[in-house]
Amino acid sequence: MDNTTNYQQLVQKVTMYLDNELTKEAEIELLKEIRKNPSFKELLNQEQSFRDFLKSKFHRRKVSPALIQSIKDKIRVPHTPNQ
């Protein structure tokens, strides 16, 4: 594998880590890699900082309960008794 592929895999692992999508074993392995390599730690810190920035600058609007119920009602399949 080349450096570009390795870097892309690292970025993918860091993203999955921050999204809580890694298995416990994969998370432990990633954290070991990060401790060994300061540039990996920097990547993790940058990604976390970027996410924190986005969270602080963009606020999610609250969705009204009526809208949620309307969507749920539209996606429900009517139950038909067995014929």
Image: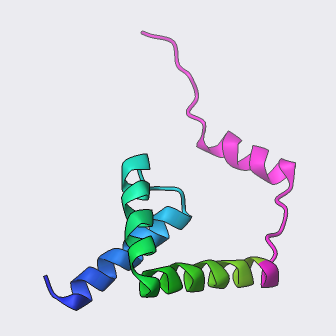
**Which residue shows up at 56% across the image and 22% down it?**
79
Residue that extends furthest to the left in the rendered view of this protein: 1
- Residue 61 appears left or right of 17: right
* Quadrant of the rendered image containing residue 73: top right
Specify how the rendered protein is coloured.
Answer: rainbow
Does residue 61 belong to the magenta stretch? yes
Q: Nearer the viewer, residue 41 or 55?
A: 41
Q: Nearer the viewer, residue 75 or 46?
A: 46
The correct choice, above or below, for 58 with respect to 74 in the image is below
Residue found at x 43% / y 57%: 27
Residue under the image location 85 percent in, 62 percent down: 62
Depth order, front residue of 58/32: 32
Quarter of the figure that contains the C terminus: top left
Q: Residue furthest top?
A: 83
Q: Does residue 61 lie above or below 58 as drawn?
A: above
Residue 61, given in percent of the width and then of the height, sits at: 83, 69
Magenta stretch, residue numbers: 56-83
Asked if 37 appears above or below 23 in the picture, the reply is: below
Query: In what quadrant of the picture does the N terminus appear?
Result: bottom left
Q: Nearer the viewer, residue 70 or 10?
A: 10
Relative horizontal placement of residue 77, taking residue 65 as reference (left or right): left
Above or below 37: residue 81? above
**Number of callouts:** 0
Q: Residue at x 40, y 81 (%)?
A: 37
Determine if the magenta segment contains residue 20: no
